[in-house]
Image (cartoon, helix red, strand yellow):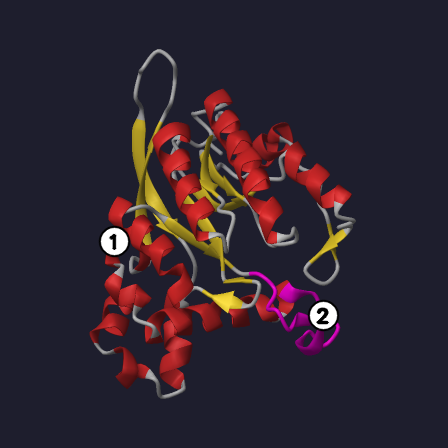
Amino acid sequence: MTDTGARCVCGRIDVHAHFLPEVYAQALERAGMRTLDGGFPVPKWSAEAALGVMDRQDIATAMVSLSSPSTHFLPPAERPALARAVNDAGAALVQARPDRFGYFACLPMPDIEASLAEIRRAFDELGADGVVLQTNTDGVYLGSPAFAPILAELNRRKTTLFLHPTSPACFGALALGRPAPLLEFPLDTTRTIVDLLYSRRLQTNPASMTPISLRLRHRSRKRNSTRKSWEGPMTAFPYQQIILNLRGLGLSCAFGDLTDSFLH
């Protein structure tokens, strides 16, 4: 804040901001989901409350996305409809406040055809700023050959991929009675990064997968076609620390020049 009380206009961007549109909250309620990932109550969310937090923290723009468990709590056949509804809500939020919000689209994983169709719709029709994927889908990690078409399409479009941790399939046996964010979120992130590295998905999809500090150009979507853009630092996840941890395990020789590009 300045001495005059004016809000900071430095262009700070929060890329790890979540939203719970009403359609998603209702889906959680219908499924009996009162808590998430081992004990966290389902939070309340509104655009007004989010804007209040952003103003207090001098945040110019929030890139909203679904947190864990995304649509994974539903049977696979029901996920495409919820993903579409959530993405419609994200697009409506950005249309209402293009100066303050962007959004990352969710996908109805593991349905490959439905996910590819939603990628096309999200970018070609809704104007999404990127895609959010959970670290695993029903216990299958992102290096799986089954997900190769998804990563290839994101790479072709040179889109931003935001990785978000979720509970592993064996969470009940590993959690030690603690919520997933305390222990299993960072561990599951490490699992999927290792899987991406050893499957060579990172190396073969460089446009969307290898950047550590991404640059965002956010374009307003005002109906008067006035286009306003700015750039700001955008960190998708603390990969540098993960790579340092893996190097500490003596795995650096397996990654070659890739780890050096991550660290510089």
Q: Residue at x 53, y 44 (%)?
A: 17
Q: Which residue is mark 1?
A: 207
Q: Is residue 236 left or right of residue 203?
A: right
Q: Residue at x 34, y 32 (%)?
A: 124
Going by the numbered disc 2, the residue's amino acid type is Arg
- Cα distance between the residues tagged 1 and 2: 36 Å
Q: Is residue 186 left or right of residue 227?
A: right
- The answer to whether mark 1 and mark 2 are in CB contact below 8 A is no
Range drawn in magenta: 166-180
Going by the numbered disc 1, the residue's amino acid type is Ala
Percent position of residue 147, x then y: 40, 60
Label 1 vs 2, first from the N-terminus: 2
- Front residue of 190/110: it is 110
Residue 93 included in the magenta stretch of the image:
no
Q: Residues within 10 Å of mark 2 (few under 14, many from 20)?
A: some
Residue that protrudes farthest toward the top in the picture:
224
Q: Which residue is mark 2?
A: 178
Above/below status of 178 relative to 2? below
